[in-house]
Amino acid sequence: MKKNTGGDAFPWTNEDTTCTGMTLRDHFAGLAMQQQGWTIWENAPVSTESFTKADARRCYQIADAMLEARQP
């Protein structure tokens, strides 16, 4: 079964190029990461060095739940 990505988050087109950018799922996962305090900013509560694959998986689980909640 194909994973629901929510489609393109920020697509744009100019006269020569079409760019699909990141998926809505990726965008939501990034927002989940920020909400948890996982940022690259100097005074972040959690160091980016401590961000693990398990943390990334959790962010995508949150993103998947957000996409599911958007369904009518």
Image (cartoon, rainbow, N blue to C red):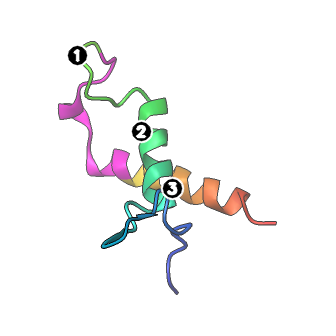
Q: Quadrant of residue 68?
A: bottom right
**Element assignment for label 1:** loop
Q: Nearer the viewer, residue 20 or 7?
A: 20
Q: Upstream in the sequence, badge 1 or badge 2? A: 2
Q: Which residue is mark 3?
A: 61
Q: Is residue 39 magenta?
A: no
Q: Residue at x 34, y 17 (%)?
A: 45
Q: Which residue is mark 2?
A: 33
Compared with 43, 11 (above or below) is below
Amino acid on which the number 3 mark rests in the picture: Gln
Compared with 27, 37 (above or below) is above
Spot occupied by residue 56 in the image (x, y as percentages of width and height):
35, 49
Q: Upstream in the sequence, badge 3 or badge 2? A: 2
> Which region shows up in magenta?
44-56
* Circles 3, 2 touching at the beta carbon (< 8 Å): no
Q: Upstream in the sequence, badge 3 or badge 1? A: 1
Q: CA distance from mark 3 to mark 1?
A: 27 Å
Amino acid on which the number 2 mark rests in the picture: Met
Q: Residue at x 40, y 67 (%)?
A: 20
User: Residue 42 — which label?
Assistant: 1
**Element assignment for label 3:** helix
Counting the numbered discs, the total is: 3
Q: Nearer the viewer, residue 26 or 14?
A: 14
Instruction: Mark 3: give few (<14), some (14-19) or many (20+) Cα within 10 Å.
Output: some
Amino acid on which the number 1 mark rests in the picture: Glu
Q: Residue at x 62, y 56 (%)?
A: 65
Q: CA distance from mark 3 to mark 2?
A: 11 Å
